[in-house]
Image: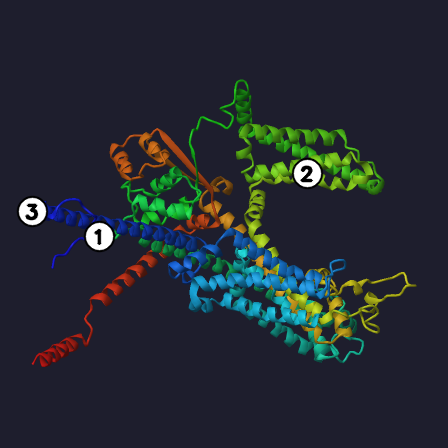
Amino acid sequence: MEVDDDRSPRASSINANDIDFDTVNQSRTERQTLRENSTELLVEEIRERSRQTQWQLNYQEAAIYLEEGENNDKFDTHPRDQSALPAYEVAHNRWFHLLDLIAAILVLLVAICERPAIEYFSLPVGIHASLEMLGLLILSLELGIRFKWVGWRAFFKHKRTVIKSCTILFMLIESIVVLVRQTSHFRVTRALRPLFLIHTYYCRGVRRITRQILQSLPPILDMIILLLFFMLIFSIFGYYLFSRNKDDMYFSTLEKSFVNLFILLTTANFPDVMMPSYNQSKFYSIFFIVYLSLELYFLMNLLLAVVYDTFSNLEKTKFQKLLIHKRIGCQHAFKLLVSDQNQHQLHMKHFMGMMKKYHPSKSRRDCYLVFKCLNTSNTGWLSLEEFYGIYDVAGVSWKLKNEDRIWSSSFKHPFNVIFKAFNTLVRFKWFDYVIYLVIGANFLWILIETIRLSAKSVNLANYDFTASWASIVFVCIYSVEVIIKILGKGPMEYFTLGWDVFDFLVTVLSVIGVLGERFENSFYYVIVLRPFRLLRLFKVKKRYRDVLGTLFVLFSKLTSLAIVTILVYYFFAIIGMEMFLNVDLKNCCKNTSVEDFYAYDNNSIFHGYYYLNNFENILASGVTLFELTVVNNWFIIMEGYAVRVSQWTRVYFMLFYIVMMVVMNIIVAFVLESFLFRIQYRRQMKLDDMDDDSVYRVEVSLSEEEVDMCEKPFSILSGHLIQLQAQADQPEPYVYKGERSRTKDDFSIKMYGDEVKTWLLEMEKERTSIIESMKGLRTRQRPNSLNLEQNGVSEQLEVNC
């Protein structure tokens, strides 16, 4: 039977008897060949499209690995397959991050309008409970998306995610109960709301500090236990020593003995606690001197030393782990970008494809400059060792270098000449010395004027603060200096240098102060802005520059620490409101040592006003907790609630003091570590000022062919021009300069250079050993493989027989 074409034949007017069958057979053969060629082309096109699609997926996954390495995200949360990519992209979208942050803040702010609400902010139960449910549902949306992209196994392995899930579930149930009952109940779980803010993307700095505090707890708790142990020993000793004195109410019981010695640790009740026993015998003062010397001056300072040492070690360990984590991310990305034919070198085409996903805002020229900067071997291909530098160069801003040009070079004559003269003037070292001399004279003038007013006991509220000629002259000099610097350096350079921005802000405050003086009595308090001019004297001495430089460097961390402190306040404020909501402290402590502080009588002139330290709403609770943090007379607040509610309420106040003591020690450790790091870095690098090394700079030269290749959008980027230029060894006409601000990690790499090399060598040894062991597993013969083969052969022979 003859096999015809699978397409249906068309009607034809040709007679079958007139057909040349040789021609027909030849035509069939040609059609068959053509069909086979078309099929091959179609298959090849499908394969090529599949390859391109796979490469695009590889580019995206490689970019994700680099982002995970940079953000210190665990690779366990990496998208497990292609279906998880949409959920990953949604979860890492900046708008989704913003929505998550808004929802977390909304849940926190519900405390303002729910019971006990701030006056004028109170909302009906249905409204504030609905707002809380809305915020919780948005937060749970992030959990659902995370579950979609990481899978259930990785989801439940992540402790922070599990804690957040359980907290949201419990709070949703509570919100539903509040909506159904239309009344609020005892809800101490509201204190866990800060967890949602800590979990957000934009609070990752807060999350890292919280993690460091928790990691520092073991040695800190050891010191606190030691501190409390000695306190208990002295409490027992004090009870047996002073309880016989009926006039001494501080040590009448063991409980009072311990509580008063705990208060004595904060020095809030000293020397009151000592005076009854001191009245009985002068030698009893030895007890208190020894106690304070041991507890306050030795153990408390030792606690700070332990916190600093633990924190410093954690900082170095964190830096080491982050450095290794970044390199592992580079390794994962590199494997996805190399081909099977060349597994040790990365082609520029695949590098450019990855950069479109990793830094989509960068131009072709910038991506090519990044590649050439990394390619130190000038081969046109990137090795893994070169690819490790992607984090250093990827964020660099590039511009064409021209050392002879300043920002005003393109201006018309005579403006370019005038602005160039300004540029020369501001870079002249005596220009700064003259300004410092003016600031010193300004300081003497302010000091003399203030002493004169103070000596005459002038009532500042009624004094005419009309701006004097001296104030106007000094401010005019400062303003002229700022204008000259902006015109000479250019706005871009001026407002990117920390000290220049500092000068600008101080000058603006000085101008506001002088203008405020023109408003006479109605605006007299602006006079306090004048001393801000003197802050510029900190630039004169290196030590002062280090102090303020540390402040600038620490600003983001200090902001995170401030947020952590506020969240701790929020936690204890919620608990305090639930415990002490309806407690009235007016006249609460009659016949006690703190009676006068809580006295309230409409007919009396004297009021202690301590009854205002309450927990009636979230803001009042915050003020009360801040007073406890300052520790001046904090025990009076504690005693008021102990008398009115229960003696066990002291546990709340003591626990708050201990927690805040740990947080404050962490803050001090942050400042100490950053300041000492700055000093040591400057000494080790032999720098006069650390700000001189605050910018990371690289230079890359391009030829005309490379520039032309980068500017044409449809030209194919290749690395062969890099090889040609390396062989020609001729200077390229276009030099590009890349700059970015150095981070703490950049300084640490230079600071711990020898240790970094050791860490990387250990990492490479471990990686090599793992690769060798994997190769051994592939090639080694299984113990029972020979027996299995023999059994299989014998069974086959039996079957054949």
Task: List x then y, in percent, for residue 217.
Answer: 54, 67
| Upstream in sequence: badge 1 or badge 2 | 1
Horizontally, is 543 left or right of 329 in the view? right
Residue 174, placed above or below residue 564: below
Q: CA distance from mark 3 to mark 1?
A: 22 Å
Task: List x then y, in percent, for residue 203.
Answer: 55, 56
User: Which numbered mark, 1 or 2, is in the foreground of this view?
Assistant: 1
Q: Residue furthest right?
A: 603
Q: CA distance from mark 3 to mark 2?
A: 102 Å
* Secondary element type, mark 3: helix
- Which residue is label 2 attached to? 509
Quarter of the image that includes the N terminus: bottom left
Identify which residue, 95 or 369, lies in the foreground.
95
* Secondary element type, mark 2: helix
Residue 563, placed above or below residue 590: above
Asked whether disc 1 touches disc 2, contact meaning CB atoms under 8 Å apart, the reply is: no
Task: Tell me which residue sits at (17%, 44%) in the image.
Answer: 13
Horizontally, is 519 left or right of 345 in the view? right
Callout 2: few (<14), some (14-19), or many (20+) C-alpha neighbours within 10 Å? Answer: some
Amino acid bearing label 2: Leu
Residue 696, placed above or below residue 209: above
- Which residue is label 3 attached to? 22
Amino acid bearing label 3: Asp
| Upstream in sequence: badge 3 or badge 2 | 3
* Secondary element type, mark 1: loop
Horizontally, is 590 left or right of 691 in the view? right
Instruction: Give the label on residue 89, or none.
Output: none
Instruction: Give the label on residue 8, or none.
Output: 1
Task: Tell me which residue sits at (44%, 48%) in the image.
Answer: 746
